[in-house]
Image (tube, rainbow, N blue to C red):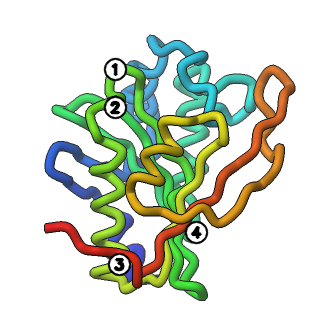
Amino acid sequence: MEKFFELFKRDIKTQRLEMRILEPTIENAQLIWNVLKDENPDDYQFMWYSVSHKSHLTESVEETQQRMKLDFESKNGCAYYIFHNGKFVGYQRIHYWAESKTLQCASVWFIKSARGFGFNTEVHDMLEKMGFEQLHMNRICRQTMAGNLASKKSIEHSGYHLDGIDRQCNMMPDGTFMDHLLFSKLASEYNGKE
């Protein structure tokens, strides 16, 4: 577990992005909230970010800080706040299960204006490289809601295998239920990219 934290629980740079571990200070929450407050929650129907689960986005600086605190105090994972050219553009949460040598990519999303640039693929290419090549993991998992066709296509395009479906396990804010798709890639299926 210590090797995981040494490798992953730190700021990471990809070709175009900075993946930062942010402490849950009011200043950092304000930094994130300054971007989220202008976003339309309807553009985030396939994620939960609000602590209260009333919205797809946090609804205040204080709630943003509370969400950040939950992520920061995780015992087996971390959350990256993703920046492009110094601007907050997205979020990625990961968990590590040492007993099964598995990295679980739990939540990932990007603000609407940062979608379509391949940032999601860039983040996951880096996580795979670190996980498979440096930590020698056996498996990396990704997931998405069944209705999130762009995410599903991205995961499948990256060579992940559909392992199963959690039927109607996500309740949407409108009270409807949606299936959750579970994917994985094994070390034996990984081809390192240079």
- Counting from the top left corner in percent of width and height, residue 16 is at 16, 43
Using the numbered discs, state the Cα–Cα distance from disc 4 to disc 3 in whole angstroms.
21 Å
Viewer-nearest of labels 4 and 2?
2
Q: Name the residue located 47 percent from the left edge and 71 percent from the top edge.
A: 185
- Counting from the top left corner in percent of width and height, residue 73 is at 56, 58
Marks 3 and 2, the one that precedes in the sequence? 2
Kindly indicate whether the residue at mark 2 contacts the one at mark 4 (C-beta within 8 angstroms): no
Q: Nearer the viewer, residue 121 or 99?
A: 121
Residue kind at label 3, given as amino acid type: Phe
When asked about the image quadrant of residue 66, the answer is top right
Residue receiving disc 3: 132
Q: Name the residue located 57 percent from the left edge and 77 percent from the top edge.
A: 97
Tag 1 secondary structure: helix
Q: Is residue 79 above or below residue 10?
A: above
Marks 1 and 4, the one that precedes in the sequence? 4
Circle 3 Cα neighbour tier, 10 Å, few/some/many (<14 / 14–19 / ≥20): many
Kindly indicate whether the residue at mark 3 contacts the one at mark 1 (C-beta within 8 angstroms): no
Residue kind at label 1, given as amino acid type: Ser
Q: Is residue 68 above or below residue 87?
A: below
Circle 4 Cα neighbour tier, 10 Å, few/some/many (<14 / 14–19 / ≥20): few
- Which of the labelled discs sits on residue 75, or is there none? 4
Tag 3 secondary structure: helix
Kindly indicate whether the residue at mark 2 contacts the one at mark 3 (C-beta within 8 angstroms): no
Viewer-nearest of labels 1 and 4?
1
Marks 4 and 3, the one that precedes in the sequence? 4
Q: Is residue 28 above or below residue 3?
A: above
Tag 2 secondary structure: strand
Residue receiving disc 2: 89
Circle 2 Cα neighbour tier, 10 Å, few/some/many (<14 / 14–19 / ≥20): many
- The quarter of the rendered structure image containing the C terminus is bottom left
